[in-house]
Image (tube, grey):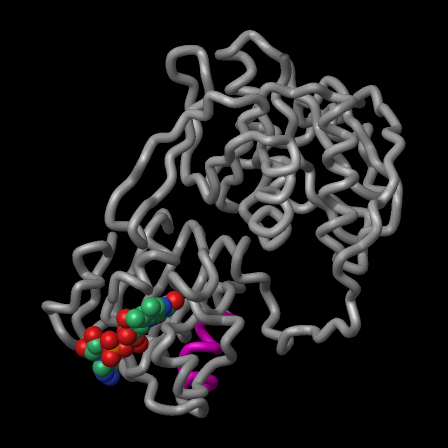
Amino acid sequence: MSILVFADSANGAFKPTAAELLGKATALAAALGTTVTAAVLGDAPAASLGGLGAAKVFQAAGDFSNYDNGAIVDALAAIVAAANPTVILAPASYIGRDALPRLAARLDTAMGSDCSDLKVEGGVVVGRRSEFAGRAYADVSISSTPAVFTVRPNTFPKPENNGGSAEVVAVDWSASTPTVSVVETLAPEATGIDLSSAGKVVAGGRSLKSKENFDSVIRPLGAALQAGVGASRAATDAGYAPHNEQVGQTGQTVNPQLYIAAGISGAIQHLAGMRTSKVIVAINKDPDAPIFQHATYGIVADLFDVVPELTKAVEALD
Ligand SMILES: Cc1cc2nc3c(=O)[nH]c(=O)nc-3n(C[C@H](O)[C@H](O)[C@H](O)COP(=O)(O)OP(=O)(O)OC[C@H]3O[C@@H](n4cnc5c(N)ncnc54)[C@H](O)[C@@H]3O)c2cc1C
């Protein structure tokens, strides 16, 4: 019995979600009286995860840089066979959204996806996930084993690595015949900070009226705050910002400490992608805009006045 954390990595370095999930797994394991193990694909420094609470790390060597979800599932399934966990935690990142449901199907088990909280109740792990585009929450437990949960990045605090070292078990695996081959990889428009895991996000809506305004009003505040830049679908559809910056039901899900929504009405489909943000600041001319019902701080004003002032004030802090 153990909790296995998929410690995602890229270019030999762990992503922040690895520390986040290992920290939470350690607390859950203490409540369950079990241990924490980790799954690593590729050549990231597996032993170092001991400093984040992993008692043992199962590592499948290989080159996973050319995204192939078949190979990822093959390698993770081999790790699960070796680790025999009762619970699997993984980030609700692109890989978590794509490969983990396939892994759950391969293991003939169920999965709670895109959780915004995890707790122990009645001796099992329970995940909280939003339903109906964020209109309701459901607490889900899974009766099949292993129970698979993916968790939104930035949901839990990241513990410091205490420098400890874990036993590393090399897992043999082989890729089944690929059903998909990658013909070409197109890099997204370079937009700086990765939105899905950004700690701060500044987003603009239809009210920006042009790409030039979006670039000259929203992006400078994003740069000053070292934040990711997001947009409503109305803004991306109008070409003010690229589609990979769209936040919402049909865009990206973000979960930052700070989300600034400038000139965004707060449609349910937009809220679906950002309402779990810890602090929401809404700037809108209309005091009745629905976004204010979800905002921690609301500024009823013209964004073209407020956002440049905010940018100046943040820049003055440096
Ligand atoms: C199936 C489906 C999926 C969808 N998926 C998404 C999604 O993923 N993400 C998403 O965002 N939307 C999505 N939508 C669209 C969504 O319903 C809204 O139409 C969209 O979010 C509206 O964008 P907006 O808030 O920028 O524009 P609007 O709703 O037009 O709001 C503009 C706001 O700006 C304010 N404003 C205007 N000028 C100023 C100013 N100068 N200063 C301050 N405030 C000002 C107005 O008061 C208004 O509140 C989806 C819709 C459907 C049907």
Above or below, 53 against 9 in this view is: above
Q: Is residue 111 left or right of residue 267?
A: right
Decide if residue 262 is in sight here: no
Depth check, front residue: 17 or 304: 17
In the rendered view, does 292 fall on the left or right side of 316?
left
Question: Where is residue 132 shown, x and y percent of the image?
Answer: 29, 51
Query: Which residues lie in the magenta part?
Result: 214-223
- Check if residue 94 falls in the magenta segment: no
Figure quadrant of residue 26:
top right
Q: Position of residue 155 (x, y in %)?
A: 46, 41
User: Please, what is the dominant secondary structure of the magenta stretch?
Assistant: helix
Q: Is residue 49 left or right of residue 29?
A: right
**Residue at position x 63%, y 12% in the image:** 1
Residue 215 lies within the magenta run: yes
Judge whether 12 appears above or below 105 on screen. Answer: below
Image position of 60 with respect to 176: above or below = above
Q: Residue at 84% of width from left, 45% of height from top?
A: 175
| Residue 219 can be seen, yes or no | yes
